[in-house]
Image (spheres, helix red, strand yellow):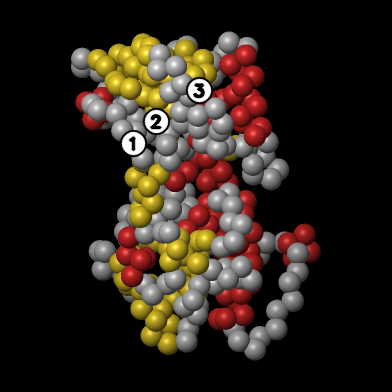
């Protein structure tokens, strides 16, 4: 049995920063994640993806950010249960939670923080026949783990969100030929990224096809070409390619969290923005898994949520004890 001050469900970037914030307040954290390593989506789905909106880092790849967050949390000696999923959550007393994993690991904590990102997730696939023929290393992937794999290769990226834009920018100097296909004329991603992609197209460094849908995938033993159709003109064309990466987002599923008595709205946990607490006293939700008015699913917003949550958790664990916040520039970071 594991004893801790705070049990954190998830081990993504927001969860790791919560360890640091809680540690400053002398609270120990134990993290549980179904993935085999810390980092959440950053480690599992796009470790080499460039991230542009972390304060102080004009560009940092996802893997490097996870490494830095682990170093930042290290003085506070977090412990981990990885490769397991929390199946049940029971509240036994005012400050006594029991969490049990699918493999029977039992964790006692005074506070529970749900930082499970999107929960259990899988990529959204386009409605194109025959995709399965070219999955599993035959040309079609739904995430990019190692961009060096595509050096000198022909690639088609399909999508109009941040991931599609960011990878197009990053891979434009790696692929021998890169085409971005988007079904609309407007993008869902950051305006700055859209501007960069438009400039790459004007400079001839990528091919940009708007108002265009995937029609079919073709090949024998591996992917050889992709057929496309313009939604406005109905004109069809076929582009030879080595790889197709559809980036249409993830389909989130809460899994067991759905049955923990929390208020849920569209696969996200409703929270009070005063401290990101849920309707169950002593349970908080931070990061992409929570929802509130004007929610922005950005890592930097999750960091803010982790800081406010930690101060509220301290008061909950230590009723009646007055705490005066002091800046790290004054106190430094003291190890346990």
Front one among 143 and 267 = 267
Residue 150 at what x, y percent from top left?
42, 20
Mark 3 crowdedness (10 Å alpha carbons): few <14, some 14-19, many ≥20: some
Closer to viewer: mark 3 or mark 1: 3
Against 260, residue 158 (above or below) is: above
- Quadrant the C terminus occupies: bottom right
Query: Does the residue at mark 3 contact the one at mark 2 (Cβ under 8 Å)?
Result: no
Q: Is there CB contact under 8 Å for labels 1 and 2?
A: yes
Q: Which residue is mark 3?
A: 210
Badge 1 or badge 2: first in the primary sequence? 1
Q: In the image as oriented, which residue stretches furthest toward the right?
A: 330
Which image quadrant is residue 127 in? top left
Q: CA distance from mark 3 to mark 2?
A: 15 Å
Residue matched to label 2: 246
Question: How far apart in space, not on screen, are marks 3 and 1 (Cα)?
Answer: 19 Å
Q: Which mark is residue 125?
A: 1
Mark 3 or 2, nearer chain start: 3
Q: Is residue 209 visible?
A: yes
Q: Is residue 225 above or below residue 64?
A: above
Task: Assess disc 1: are there few (<14), some (14-19) or many (≥20) residues with their C-alpha within 10 Å of its C-alpha.
Answer: some
Residue 97's disc is: none
Mark 1–mark 2 distance (CA, rounded to whole Å): 7 Å
């Amino acid at each position: 049995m594991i004893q801790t001050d705070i049990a954190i469900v998830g081990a993504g970037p927001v969860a790791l920063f919560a360890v640091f914030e809680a540690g400053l307040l002398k609270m120990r954290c134990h993290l549980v994640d179904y993935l085999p390593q810390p980092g959440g989506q950053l480690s599992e789905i796009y470790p080499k993806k460039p991230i542009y909106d972390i304060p102080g880092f004009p560009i940092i790849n996802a893997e490097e950010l996870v490494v830095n967050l682990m170093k930042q949390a290290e003085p506070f000696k977090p412990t981990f249960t990885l490769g397991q999923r929390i199946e049940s959550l029971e509240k036994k007393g005012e400050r006594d939670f029991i969490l049990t994993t699918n493999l029977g690991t039992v964790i006692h904590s005074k506070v529970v923080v749900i930082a499970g990102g999107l929960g259990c997730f899988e990529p959204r696939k386009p409605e194109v026949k025959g995709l399965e023929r070219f999955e599993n290393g035959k040309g079609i992937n739904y995430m990019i783990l190692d961009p060096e794999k595509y050096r000198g290769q022909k690639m088609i990226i399909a999508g109009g969100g941040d991931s599609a834009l960011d990878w197009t920018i990053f891979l434009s100097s790696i692929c021998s030929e890169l085409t971005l296909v988007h079904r609309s004329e407007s993008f869902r991603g950051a305006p700055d990224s859209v501007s960069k992609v438009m400039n790459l197209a004007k400079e001839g460094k990528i091919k940009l096809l708007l108002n265009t849908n995937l029609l079919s995938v073709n090949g024998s033993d591996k992917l050889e070409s992709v057929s496309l159709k313009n939604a406005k003109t109905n004109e069809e064309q076929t582009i030879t390619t080595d790889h197709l990466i559809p980036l249409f987002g993830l389909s989130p599923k809460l899994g067991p969290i759905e049955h923990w008595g929390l208020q849920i709205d569209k696969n996200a946990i409703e929270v009070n923005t005063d401290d990101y607490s849920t309707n169950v006293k002593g349970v908080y939700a931070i990061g992409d898994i929570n929802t509130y008015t004007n929610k922005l699913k950005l890592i930097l917003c999750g960091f803010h949520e982790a800081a406010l949550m930690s101060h509220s958790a301290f008061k909950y664990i230590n009723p009646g004890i007055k705490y005066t916040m002091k800046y790290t520039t004054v106190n430094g970071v003291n190890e346990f």
